[in-house]
């Protein structure tokens, strides 16, 4: 949790993650109780916030700044999907759901993000229905705690199972 009176206006919220770009720091945080909103804000001089932006309802936000100083953010949505957004220097993109398909009963959590030298996002997260595990000890499980990896190097997100939670 942070609150600081040296900033104008003073920010208030629960810090989730921060990353630095060229002469600025971007921060993602939440506030709002049960139905938390994820917010982005940045500072260039350490004294003034440049403007709070609500990114959506969710939790577990992470941020990465690319080589062009554009923030990329992932977070877990209220319905347990992994959302991705990018700022292009002018505005935020629409929310893109990286994780499981619409209607899936799987739950996703624990996203993380990095951005490569070409500005492509590389995202990891946990998904209870992430892949095609087959049978486990004679059973066909439906809820699999898999670690997933997704990237958009092809222009759209492609995901794969990085670690099958039931695979020995």
Image: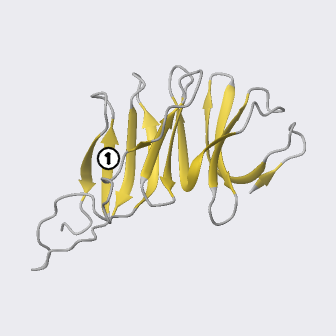
Provide residue 57's location: percent of width, then percent of height: 57, 53
Name the residue carrying label 1: 149
Q: How many marks?
A: 1
- Compared to residue 31, the image places residue 105 above or below, namely below
Q: Residue furthest right?
A: 5
- The quarter of the image holding the N terminus is bottom right
Q: Judge left or right: residue 33 versus residue 130.
A: right
Which residue appears at 44% of the width and 60% of the height? 80
Query: What residue is shown at x 74% (from left), y 26% (from top)?
Result: 44
- In percent of the image, x 32 and y 54: which residue is there? 100
Residue closest to the eye, 32 or 108: 32
- Would you identify the image quadrant in which residue 33 lies? bottom right
Q: Is residue 80 left or right of residue 165?
A: right
Q: Residue at x 27, y 68 (%)?
A: 144
**Left or right relative to 73: residue 158:** left
Question: Whole-percent x and y of residue 26?
Answer: 65, 35
């Amino acid at each position: 949790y942070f609150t600081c009176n040296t900033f104008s206006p003073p920010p208030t919220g629960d810090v989730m993650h921060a990353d630095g770009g060229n002469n600025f720091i971007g921060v993602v945080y939440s506030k709002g109780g049960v139905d938390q909103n994820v917010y982005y804000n940045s500072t260039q001089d350490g004294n003034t916030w440049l403007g709070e932006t609500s990114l959506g309802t969710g939790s577990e936000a992470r941020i990465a700044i690319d080589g062009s100083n554009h923030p990329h953010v992932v977070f877990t949505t209220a319905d347990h999907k992994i959302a991705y957004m990018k700022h292009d220097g002018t505005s935020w993109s629409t929310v893109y759901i990286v994780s499981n398909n619409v209607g899936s009963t799987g739950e996703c959590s624990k996203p993380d993000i990095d951005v490569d030298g070409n500005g492509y996002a590389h995202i990891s997260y946990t998904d209870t229905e992430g892949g095609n595990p087959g049978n486990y000890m004679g059973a066909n499980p439906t809820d699999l705690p898999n670690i997933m990896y997704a990237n958009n190097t092809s222009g759209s997100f492609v995901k794969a199972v990085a670690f099958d939670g039931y695979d020995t």
